[in-house]
């Protein structure tokens, strides 16, 4: 990408991005194109990160291991649902992922956990996510029974209108009362250590960008 095009893209993304300054946006754009590789835009095909490349970043950089959650995070970044994360989806997605307000993170986590996109987190969805994210403990008991019990306990704590599923209002109220419940059904945000390391690695050497 030539300098003029890069400058224009940086300006445009910075204007619409609440949590990164111009220098940081430029660093993220450079990282994106390094990750995608030296690909020229082919006719009709946007350059971007596919599911596997993105999952690899979540795993290697942010220590995520849960396949279902990583898949859902990919879908949250891929706003137009075309199976590919573009440079703008990358920057805007990381804005919430790394530095979002509590409100933004609640919306993001809820959408990750709402597996079928119907606006609720159902018992079945909780069961699948908790089964996926809990370590398999060898025991004589049926592990599914333990997870069902956990689902019931979680519902009791979070389902404020007692309709047997979580709406965003239920989830928001529970998280505001106890922030630890933000990632109740699996880790879908970076832990503070990996966030700090990622930012330190990516947002460095401002002298290279002193023309901005």
Image (cartoon, rainbow, N blue to C red):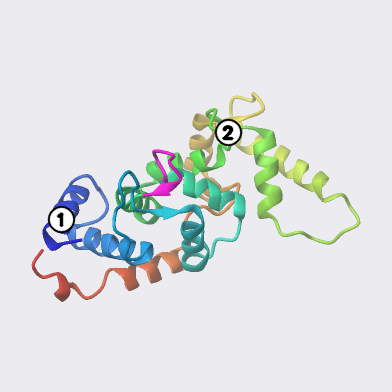
45 or 208, nearer to the observer: 45
SS at badge 1: helix
**Mark 2 lies on residue:** 116
Question: Would you say 87 lies left or right of 76 here?
Answer: left
Question: Would you say 74 lies left or right of 30 here?
Answer: right
Considering the whole magenta stretch, tell me its main secondary structure: loop
Q: Residue at x 24, y 58 (%)?
A: 25
Tell me where residue 97 appears, x and y as whole percent: 40, 53
Question: Would you say 36 lies left or right of 172 here?
Answer: left
Tell me where residue 202 appears, x and y as whole percent: 31, 69
- Mark 2–mark 1 CB contact (< 8 Å): no
Q: Which residue lies furthest to the left in this view?
A: 211
Location of residue 199 (image quadrant):
bottom left
Question: Would you say 4 lies left or right of 43 here?
Answer: left
Q: Residue furthest right?
A: 140
Q: Residue at x 66, y 40 (%)?
A: 126
152 or 70, nearer to the observer: 70
**Mark 1 lies on residue:** 5
Mark 2 vs mark 1: give the one in front. Answer: 1
Tell me where residue 105 appears, x and y as whole percent: 42, 46
Location of the C terminus (image quadrant): bottom left
SS at badge 2: loop
Tell me where residue 191 appears, x and y as whole percent: 48, 62
Counting other residues with Cα less than 10 Å from the Cα at mark 1, is it few (<14), some (14-19), or many (20 or more)? few
Q: Does the magenta stretch include residue 123?
A: no
């Amino acid at each position: 990408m030539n300098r003029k095009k890069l400058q224009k893209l940086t300006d445009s993304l910075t204007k619409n991005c609440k949590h990164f300054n111009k220098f940081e946006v430029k660093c993220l754009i450079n990282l994106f194109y390094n990750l995608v590789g030296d690909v020229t835009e082919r006719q009709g095909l946007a350059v971007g990160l596919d599911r596997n490349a993105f999952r690899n970043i979540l795993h290697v950089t942010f220590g995520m291991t849960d396949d279902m959650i990583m898949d859902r995070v990919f879908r949250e970044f891929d706003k137009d649902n075309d199976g590919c994360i573009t440079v703008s989806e990358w920057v805007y997605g990381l804005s919430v992922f790394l530095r979002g307000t509590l409100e933004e993170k609640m919306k993001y986590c809820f959408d990750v956990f709402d597996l079928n996109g119907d606006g609720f987190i159902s018992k079945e969805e909780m069961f699948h996510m908790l089964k996926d994210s809990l370590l398999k403990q060898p025991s004589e008991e049926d592990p599914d029974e333990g997870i069902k019990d956990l689902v019931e306990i979680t519902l009791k704590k979070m389902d404020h209108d007692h309709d047997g599923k979580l709406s965003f209002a239920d989830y928001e109220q529970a998280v505001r009362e106890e922030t630890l419940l933000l990632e109740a059904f699996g880790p879908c945000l970076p832990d503070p250590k990996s966030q700090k390391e990622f930012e330190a690695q990516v947002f460095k050497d401002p002298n290279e960008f002193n023309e901005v």
